[in-house]
Amino acid sequence: MAERVEIVEMAPRDGLQNEVRFIATSDKIALVDALSDVGFTRIEVASFVSPKWVPQMADGAAVLAGITRRPGTRYAALTPNLRGVEAALAAGVDEVAIFASASEGFSRANLNCSIAESLERFAPVVEAAQAALVPVRGYVSMVTDCPFEGAIAPDRVAQVVAALRDLGCYEVSLGDTIGQGRPETVTAMLNAVLNQMPSERLAGHFHDTAGRALDNIEASLALGLRVFDAAAGGLGGCPYAPGAAGNVATEKVAARLMALGYETGLDPAALARAAALARAMKGGSHV
Ligand code: HMG
Ligand code: MG
């Protein structure tokens, strides 16, 4: 039997957060419902962040209230602070994610605080989620390159991964936020990170700015990673990361994984429909 690789779907959150035009809540719900038909185990559907920082994500509670939940799919949201996790839990999320950076410059730009301060702030977030029996995923951004600091040393990434592990994250997703990683830099970064966390608890999160995301996924597969984030239609970017284009497209990742002999458990026809819907929602972005 073919080995399973999981794709975690990002379009409703990482995909839409960068869109300048406000997308109606009903359209966001329709996208999540179309993605639910594809058979993902996890879909990130919202962010409970400051609406002053990311206005597009202000309707997270309404999105969660409006979707039709597919049994077997976990619906997740980003939570930067205690206020965020309390709102996410009240909205009925199945899991939450905290998000740190390997670069001080991006930590300031994205969270308005240092890396150390962000980790301190995440401790009560994890506590609140765990008290509600809700699992916490961690992200590290700028794992190879940063628009503010240039190349990022692999040890810095490993340190943040270790901190997120110690806080209680069941998995850490490694973000090439601006899509400038190369198989060599991704491999060097992973070799450092694997000293802190086993491959079964790591995910790759590649943006496709330079068209190297699939190569970077293959480099990660070679080191044992079996979970990858992607966005249907290649939607995405981060409003606080200049140069961050879309997440690698889910349909491209699924096709490459199939060609490599892995199975994803996704329905290709439903994925094509969801990807078309996602692409139709794409207007202007912040980059
Ligand atoms: P701040 O301005 O330092 O904090 O922002 P604050 O406490 O002064 O809050 C500012 C205002 O927001 C206040 O409102 C708060 O009440 C409110 P005011 O008093 O001025 O009326 N506020 C909130 N409202 C709703 N929900 C909340 C919340 N928190 C505060 N949870 C803060 C600090 C962390 C809040 C801000 O920097 C923020 O929201 N940042 C999030 C930015 C973001 O979402 N970025 C994109 C996601 S990360 C990403 O895309 C990377 C990833 O994909 C991986 C990769 O690619 O690398 C994950
Ligand atoms: Mg991202």
Image (cartoon, rainbow, N blue to C red):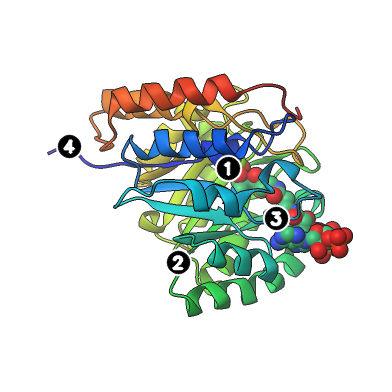
In the picture, measured across the screen, residue 150 lies left or right of residue 39, that is right
Q: Which residue is mark 2?
A: 135
Q: Identify the mark nearer the N-term, 4 or 2.
A: 4
On the rendered image, what quadrant is the C terminus found in?
top right
Q: Identify the mark nearer the N-term, 3 or 1.
A: 1
- In the rendered image, the residue lying farthest to the left is 1
Mark whose residue sits in front, 2 or 3? 3
Label 3 vs label 1: CA separation?
11 Å
Please provide percent x and percent y for residue 75. 45, 52
Q: Which residue is mark 3?
A: 49
Please provide percent x and percent y for residue 47. 62, 51
User: Pointer 4: residues within 10 angstroms few (<14), some, or many (20+)?
Assistant: few
Please provide percent x and percent y for residue 157. 61, 55
Label 1 vs label 2: CA separation?
18 Å
As drawn, the label of residue 2 is 4
Q: Which residue is mark 1?
A: 13
Q: Is mark 3 within 8 Å of ligand 1?
A: yes
Q: Identify the mark nearer the N-term, 3 or 4.
A: 4
